[in-house]
């Protein structure tokens, strides 16, 4: 999705590449949704939270806000019940909420993400 012109010959091919990438990313999230269900959830590897869940949540966030102007539609994730449940459960955890306050990230970083506007001093700023 980033630097699309590097991967095609000519600007007229960029829309097709981006459409294909949207479909591919959405398909990968669909596979993850099925895997959560297969493992019995609520997390990607089953009953225990792991770093995989945290990484999945941030990938979902990034897919919804970057690249600006051409992001994965929020509905693509909202339509995946296992992934959406994981994102919803993770973002209300006290540790995630503390990190959101510290990094000046909106309180719903995974189910309603917004592009950061950090002030000086935040890790992301």
Image (tube, grey):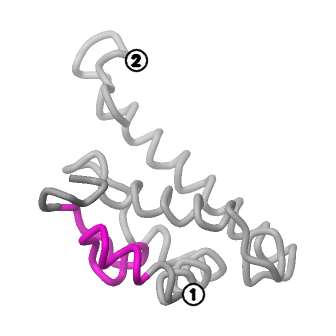
Q: Is residue 16 above or below residue 24?
A: above
Side of 66 relative to 23 (left or right) = left
Side of 118 relative to 82 (left or right) = left
x and y percent of residue 85 in the render?
59, 85
- The residue furthest right is 39
Q: Residue at x 48, y 82 (%)?
A: 91
Magenta stretch mostly in which secondary structure?
Answer: loop
Q: Earlier in the sequence, mark 1 or mark 2?
A: 2
* Residue 89 covered by magenta stretch: no
Q: How many marks?
A: 2
Q: Write down the region rendered in magenta.
A: 97-117
Q: Residue at x 41, y 83 (%)?
A: 97
Q: Residues within 10 Å of mark 2 (few under 14, many from 20)?
A: few
What is the quadrant of residue 102 in the picture? Answer: bottom left
In terms of secondary structure, where does tag 1 sit?
helix
Of residue 96 and residue 17, the one placed in the foreground of this image is 96
Residue occupied by mark 2 = 7
- The residue furthest top is 9
Of the 4 image quadrants, the one containing the N terminus is top left
Residue occupied by mark 1 = 89
Of badges 1 and 2, the one in the foreground is 1
- Distance, label 1 to label 2, CA atoms, is 37 Å
């Amino acid at each position: 999705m980033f630097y699309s012109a590097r991967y095609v010959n000519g600007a007229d091919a960029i829309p097709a590449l981006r459409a294909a990438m949207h479909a591919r990313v959405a398909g990968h999230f669909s596979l993850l949704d099925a895997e959560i269900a297969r493992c019995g959830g609520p997390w990607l590897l089953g009953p225990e939270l792991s770093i995989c869940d945290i990484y999945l949540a941030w990938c979902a966030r990034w897919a919804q806000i970057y690249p600006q102007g051409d992001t994965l539609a929020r509905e693509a994730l909202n339509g995946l019940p296992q992934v959406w449940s994981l994102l919803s459960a993770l973002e209300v955890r006290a540790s995630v909420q503390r990190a959101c306050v510290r990094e000046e990230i909106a309180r719903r970083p995974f189910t309603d993400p917004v592009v950061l506007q950090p002030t000086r001093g935040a890790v992301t700023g």
